[in-house]
Amino acid sequence: MNAFIKQDQIGRDKTIMLFPKLDLVESPNQYSVWDMSGMTTNIAGDVKPFLMEVKDRDVKSSSYETVFMEVKKYQALTKLADENNIQDIFYINHYTDNITYVFNLKNIKVYDLQLVVKKAPKTTMGATEYVDKIFVELPIHHGRKYNNK
């Protein structure tokens, strides 16, 4: 198991612990655009499918006022959701101070998003080469905060 898969699994395990009542299904492909999926049922009995993208960050939640997501990832998730009639896309960010922020990307308006170009590792884990990447900047106040203590 490489470092990327280990880190990805840590985030998935934290998500399962944070939401023990959800019946979450992990993506069979560790390199898929989504990490987990599931269904919720509202009080009217309507079933709504959802996708989750999970990140386990190696910083405290107070380190930044925004959360970043690569535009390519954002576009791929929203396209997948639209093609499969999936109403919710949750972007989950776990931090070292036991805080988690959850964003429902479907509830964030395009005009609330800011695009930024940042130098970032070419690949998620183990990259030594940095390249310019375009990110969506999600303000923290658009997420729901969970204390995992």
Image: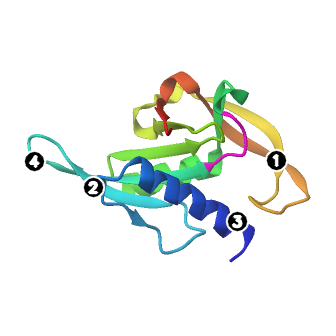
**Which class describes the residues within 10 Å of circle 3: few (<14), some (14-19), or many (20+)?**
some
Rendering coords of residue 101 (x, y %): 52, 36
Rendering coords of residue 32 (x, y %): 55, 66
Who comes first in sequence, dot 4 or dot 1?
4
- Does dot 4 land on a helix, a strand or a loop? loop
Disc 4/disc 1 C-alpha distance (Å): 44 Å
Q: Which residue is mark 3?
A: 4
Looking at this view, is 47 or 97 the one in front? 97
Q: Which residue is mark 4?
A: 45
Label number found at residue 39:
2
* CB within 8 Å, label 4 to label 2: no
Q: Is residue 133 above or below residue 109?
A: below
The amino acid type of the residue labelled 2 equals Met
Q: Which residue is mark 1?
A: 120
Q: Which residues are magenta?
A: 56-60
- Does dot 2 land on a helix, a strand or a loop? strand
Rendering coords of residue 144 (x, y %): 45, 30
Who comes first in sequence, dot 1 or dot 3?
3
Residue most extreme to the front: 149
